[in-house]
Image: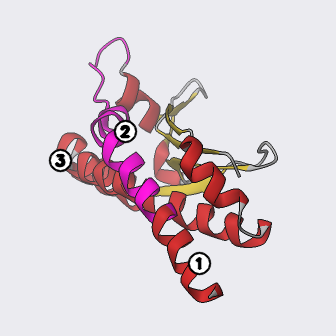
Amino acid sequence: MSAFSLQSGGTGAALKGGPALDRMLKGLEKKEAKKIVRSAVTKGIKISMRAMKSNAVSMVGGEMGALINSNIQSRAFKRQRPGSFARFLSLKPNVPGFIHRTKDGQEYYIPAQVEFGHDDVAPIPFMRAAADSTRAKTIKRTTDHIKAGILKHAKKAT
C-alpha cells in the first residue's frame, strides 16, 4: 500500500507514504498492511470531522447547524486504486431537513446553499475551512498511526 489519501470537504490531503513508510509496509503481509493503513486513515480523518461538526454548530448555528452536525459522516471511496485507501467526509444522503421545495416544485439542497452561498446569502464554508485548518494535523496523525501500527506488528511478530 504505497499511497494514502484523505479527502475532506472537496479538498484532499494526499499522504504519499514516503520511502521509509513504503518499505516498512511492503515488508508486512498485505492483509496486515491494509489493516494498519485503513485504521490510520480512519483515525486521521476524525480530526477534520470534529472540526466540521464544530464549525456547523458555531458558524451555521440554529436548527440547521445542529442538523448538519448530526449528519456529517466519514466514508470510504467506492472505487479505489489497488494498493491505496481513501476516505472522505460528507453529509448523510436523503435527510429530509436538507431538501427545500419551492411552490414551483424546484428542490434545493440547503447544505450546499450554506457552504457555497447563493444570490441573496454569502457562503459559510464550514466544511472547507475545517479541511484547510486541520490538513497538517490529519496528515501527522495518520503518519504517526501508520508507524505505530508497523511497530506494533513487528513486536507481535518477534
The magenta stretch is 118-146
- Do we see residue 94 in this rendering? no
Residue type of the residue flagged with mark 2: Ala
Query: How far across and down, in percent of the image, does residue 102 sit?
Result: 51, 29
- Tell me the CA gap for discs 2 and 3: 16 Å
Say whether residue 76 is left or right of residue 99: right
The crowd level at tag 3 (other Cα within 10 Å; few <14, some 14-19, many 20+) is few
Residue type of the residue flagged with mark 3: Ser
- Do we see residue 15 in this rendering? yes
Res. 131 mark? 2
Viewer-side label of 1, 2: 1
Instruction: Return the residue at label 3.
Output: 58
User: Which residue is painted at 65% across and 59% down in the image?
Assistant: 25
When asked about the image quadrant of residue 26, the answer is bottom right
SS state under label 3: helix
Say whether residue 48 is left or right of residue 26: left
**Magenta-colored stretch includes residue 138:** yes
- Tell me the CA gap for discs 1 and 2: 33 Å
Viewer-side label of 1, 3: 1
Residue type of the residue flagged with mark 1: Ala
The crowd level at tag 1 (other Cα within 10 Å; few <14, some 14-19, many 20+) is few
Upstream in sequence: badge 1 or badge 2: 2
SS state under label 2: helix
Res. 154 mark? 1
- Tell me the CA gap for discs 1 and 3: 44 Å
**Magenta-colored stretch includes residue 48:** no
Res. 126 mark? none
Q: Is residue 56 above or below residue 129?
A: below
Q: Is residue 63 above or below residue 38?
A: above
